[in-house]
Image: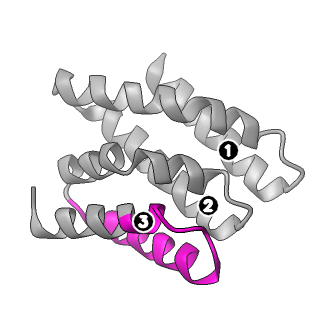
Amino acid sequence: MTHLLNSLISQTNVLFSKKEDEVTWQKINISFEQSKTLTESDFLQFLIQTKDIIVRSMASERSKLSGTTLSLLNNAIIIISKEKNNEIVTKIFSFLDLILPTLIKLTGKSNKVICTRAECTLIEMGKVLS
């Protein structure tokens, strides 16, 4: 694991232990944005290591945080579609199983932006997994 990966996992998991408020949600969002600069394999490791906060952030009422989180998932789906390492793919599939119920719930939100983002993510998942 790279230093950046370890640092992002550590700071994100510390934020998970705190209640989401004006300060923490922005820090979580920044961590998620920074994770997009990781190599593909490190990025997938980041998702696996921070899965609990990802699920919580997907369901956040803060549409920017929810949107960033769904963007992470879309990036993961793209990586999965070209990944050849079966061990990594298996880990990511179990990760996707964890997030699927929350994704489905988001499609029923009254916030149309969040709802549409969730629907798009589900469609992309369906394309890759079929």
For badge 2, the amino acid type reads Gly
What residue do we see at 47% from left, 78% from top?
Answer: 27
Disc 2 on helix, strand or loop? helix
> Where's residue 8, x and y in %?
28, 67
In the image, 60 versus 72, the foreground residue is 60
Left or right of residue 98: residue 4: left
Dot 1 lies on which element?
helix
The amino acid type, in three-letter code, at marker 3 is Phe
Q: Mark 2 or mark 1, which is nearer the start of the sequence?
A: 2
Looking at the rendered image, the quarter that the N terminus falls into is bottom left
Residue type (three-letter) at the residue carrying disc 1: Ala
Return the mark for residue 118: 1
Q: Which disc, if any, is residue 15?
A: none
Q: Residues within 10 Å of mark 3 (few under 14, many from 20)?
A: many
Q: CA distance from mark 3 to mark 2?
A: 11 Å
Q: Secondary structure at mark 3?
A: helix
Residue, disc 2: 67
Q: Main secondary structure of the magenta part?
A: helix
Residue under label 3: 32
Residue 123 sits above or below residue 18 on the image: above
In the rendered structure, which segment of residues is drawn in magenta?
14-38
Q: Residue at x 45, y 54 (%)?
A: 72
